[in-house]
Image (spheres, rainbow, N blue to C red):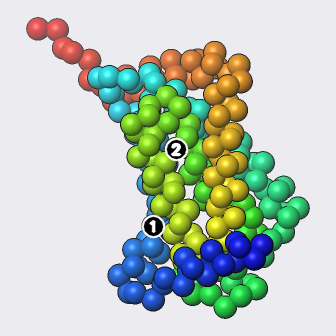
């Protein structure tokens, strides 16, 4: 735990610059929402290429995020790790949370979404993985998580996405993609009118 705290002090100790503080605070509070919107768009946008792959990735990522967050809850209460600001002097830039620190819910959900999409679309998935990593660093920067919290969340989220990808869930994923995809295509894509 000493290494975890030393890394925390290194990252959190960078705070104090008004522009960086505002930027990382914004990222820590809003990047998870942006990731959810991007995954939704990966499903909803009628891409000309790789539409079905992106939809499969969005389905796997979303399911993995939900399941990983369910798994994270009993782990958090079993480990019951206090937030950094409860045990150490920190530069806390966002409101305190009553939840345990380990694992980070933000990192868990973000990496599940990003890795789920990456499994089907390396380009878009890589962008989301970079955003998930940035979210994780920002949660340490603002003083609400140790690096080990976000690392555990990242492993849990990505691991759940990988497990769903490898398990025999493809038929279920295809069913969701076809059914939900057909509905969204009817709503979002205008049928060509007959001349």
For residue 50, above or below residue 100: above
Question: Which one is nearer the viewer's eye here, 68 or 145?
Answer: 145
The secondary structure type at the circle numbered 1 is helix
Callout 1: 10 Å neighbours few (<14), some, many (20+)? Answer: many
Whole-percent x, y for residue 158 in the image: 63, 43
The secondary structure type at the circle numbered 2 is helix
State whether residue 27 appears in this view: yes
Outermost residue to the right? 78
Please state the total of marks drawn on the protein image: 2
Whole-percent x, y for residue 84 in the image: 70, 79
Residue that appears at 21% across and 15% down: 192
Residue that appears at 82% across and 56% down: 75
Residue 14 located left or right of residue 96: left
Question: Which one is nearer the viewer's eye here, 45 or 160?
Answer: 160
For residue 55, above or below residue 130: above
Residue that appears at 51% across and 61% down: 135
Q: Which residue position is annotated with label 1?
A: 27
The earlier-in-sequence mark between 1 and 2 is 1
The image quadrant of residue 43 is top left
Q: Which mark is residue 114?
A: 2
Residue that appears at 78% across and 48% down: 71
State whether residue 94 appears in this view: no
Outermost residue to the top? 195
């Amino acid at each position: 735990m000493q290494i975890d705290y030393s890394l925390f002090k290194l990252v959190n100790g960078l705070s104090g610059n008004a522009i960086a503080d505002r930027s990382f605070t914004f990222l820590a509070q809003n990047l998870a929402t942006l990731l959810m919107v991007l995954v939704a768009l990966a499903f909803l946008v009628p891409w000309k290429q790789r539409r079905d792959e992106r939809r499969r990735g969005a389905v796997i990522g979303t399911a993995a995020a939900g399941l990983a967050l369910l798994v994270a809850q009993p782990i958090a209460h079993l480990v019951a790790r206090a937030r950094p600001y409860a045990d150490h002097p920190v530069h806390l830039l966002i409101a305190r949370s009553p939840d345990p620190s380990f694992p980070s819910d933000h990192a868990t959900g973000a990496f599940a979404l990003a890795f789920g999409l990456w499994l089907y679309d390396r380009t878009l998935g890589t962008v989301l993985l970079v955003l998930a990593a940035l979210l994780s660093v920002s949660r340490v920067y603002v003083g609400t998580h140790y690096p080990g919290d976000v690392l555990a969340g990242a492993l849990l989220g990505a691991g759940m996405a990988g497990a769903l990808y490898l398990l025999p869930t493809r038929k279920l994923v295809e069913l969701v993609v076809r059914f939900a995809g057909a509905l969204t295509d009817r709503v979002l894509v205008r049928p060509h009118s007959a001349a």
